[in-house]
Structures are given as structure tokens and as C-alpha cells.
Image (cartoon, rainbow, N blue to C red):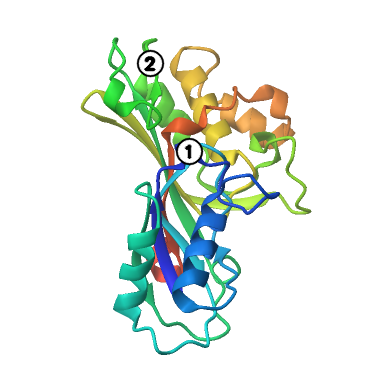
Amino acid sequence: MKLVIAYDGGAYHGWQRQAAGVDTVQERIETVAARVLRHPVTVCGAGRTDAGVHAEGQVANLHTSNLAVPIVGLRRAMNSRLPADIAVRSVAPVPDDFHASRSAVGKTYRYRLQLAPQRRADLAGRVWAYWRPLEIERMQEAAWRLLGEHDFRGFAGSAEDRESTVRRIFRCSVSEQGQEMHVVVTGNGFLYNMVRNIVGTLVEIGRGHGPPERIETILSTADRRQAGPTAPPDGLSMVCVYYDPAELKS
């Protein structure tokens, strides 16, 4: 089964199951699915979102031999048992070889910055409240320099241990949405903390700390010290996971 899941990550230590007693989204989903299906369940997610990071379209898969539970009933039964900050948006049958992570061809993330001079309590934990002025044109010019295939080692967190750090970015946009600024990034894959480091760098450039060409320096040197600080997790959300290459490039 393929599940599309939304959650507010503020109360959890990320998506991935951890040691006993550590509350994660994956552990919550697995516990509830096992209760509904009446057998142990392992849920595989498309991405390991960090503590405090949210999702609108996380994708996961599970295998079940219990065909007595209808698909609509499975979603309803899980949602009735999950906490209010986690929701299964849809459930659909998929081929046995489908894997939420390995079958994915890309993802879209959105980062929200609140630009209002006074914080809004109702957005706490959902945006990065940023009170300094930002020049959006500089940020937009820097963002398009990320497009294409590059070695993104300079934007990876120190815990990144994958052998290849080459990724392709199809979209990186910066736009004003009322009193917010949104950074939307679509790529064929992402490194640890890559989106948050991109946002932190774009914000630094928007403040006037270096020209838009700073992006090219980071890409060419693969030096994390040349990039900006890691943006806080609050404003980041996994929006969509793609399995059809045509959708990724549209």
C-alpha cells in the first residue's frame, strides 16, 4: 500500500524511527497500522525529515496480508487512532516492488519565512519569523544559479555520508506571498540539511552578505564554510514526492 501523509513535525524527533521512548512520525504510523491490520508493520518513508520539519505530501509504503480491511476503511481507521497532528491523506494499492524512497524520482520542498515586523503566535513553529529586511531580487538571482546538475557538497550538513553528493535541481524559486516569503525547491534528490542550508545562504545574500555569485563559489569549491547558516526547521515542509519523471519536470 502507498500512503500519502501530512504532519506537523513540531512535536516529533523527525520522521525516522529511533530508540525506544523517542517519539517519531514513523513510529506513530507503524503502531497504528499494526493495530488496524492486526500484524506487525514496517513503514518505509520517502524522506527522513528532521525534528521540527513538516510534511504536506510525505509518501510511505507498507506491506499487508490482511485483505479484509478495505482501502477506505484503512485510511479512516488509521486517522481515527493517530494524533491530530498526523493525517493519512490517501491510501492506494501499488505493485509489490514499489518503494517510497527507492522508486522516487524527485521531491519538492517549501520553506516559509514570515516577514512581518511582529511575530504571529498562530504561525509559531510553522515559519521562520525573520524581521531583517531582505532584497528579494538578489535572492531570486542567486536561486536560479542553483538550477541544473551540481555537486552540492557545500550545501550538505556535516552528518552527510552518502558517496555521491551530485544532485539536479529543476526549480528554485523565491516569491513574496503577502507577509511571507516562500522558497520552493524541486530536485531529483536532496542531501542532509541541503534545503535549509540553501535557504540560509539565500537569506544571507538577501541581507547583502555577498553577491548572488556566491552560489557559484560554494558549488565550485564544495566548501560548506562558504555557505550561510542552516535555517531553522520550523519553516520547512515536504510538499510532494514524484514517481513519474514527466511530473517532476513539468
* Residue 149 percent coordinates (x, y): 59, 51
Left or right of residue 177: residue 183 = right
Q: Does the CB distance between marks 2 and 1 fall below 8 Å? A: no
Residue 118 in the image: above or below residue 146: above
Left or right of residue 129: residue 164 = right
Residue at 58% x, 30% y is: 215
Q: Is residue 108 visible?
A: yes
What residue type is disc 1 on?
Ala
> In the rendered image, which residue does mark 1 sit on?
11
How packed is label 2: few (under 14 Cα within 10 Å), some, or many (20 or more)? Answer: some
Q: Nearer the viewer, mark 2 or mark 1?
A: 1
| Of the image marks 2 and 1, the number of the one nearer the N terminus | 1
Q: Nearer the viewer, residue 199 or 10?
A: 10
Please, what secondary structure does the residue beneath circle 1 have?
helix
Residue at 53% x, 63% y is: 31
Quadrant of the rendered image containing residue 213: top right
Residue at 65% x, 28% y is: 217
What residue type is disc 2 on?
Leu
Please, what secondary structure does the residue beneath circle 2 have?
loop
Left or right of residue 99: residue 181 = left
Number of on-image labels: 2
Q: Quadrant of the C terminus?
A: bottom left
Q: Nearer the viewer, residue 141 or 228?
A: 228
How packed is label 1: few (under 14 Cα within 10 Å), some, or many (20 or more)? Answer: some
| Mark pair 2, 1: CA separation | 30 Å
**Residue farthest left in this picture:** 178
* Residue 39 percent coordinates (x, y): 56, 78
> In the rendered image, which residue does mark 2 sit on?
134
Q: Nearer the viewer, residue 213 or 68?
A: 68
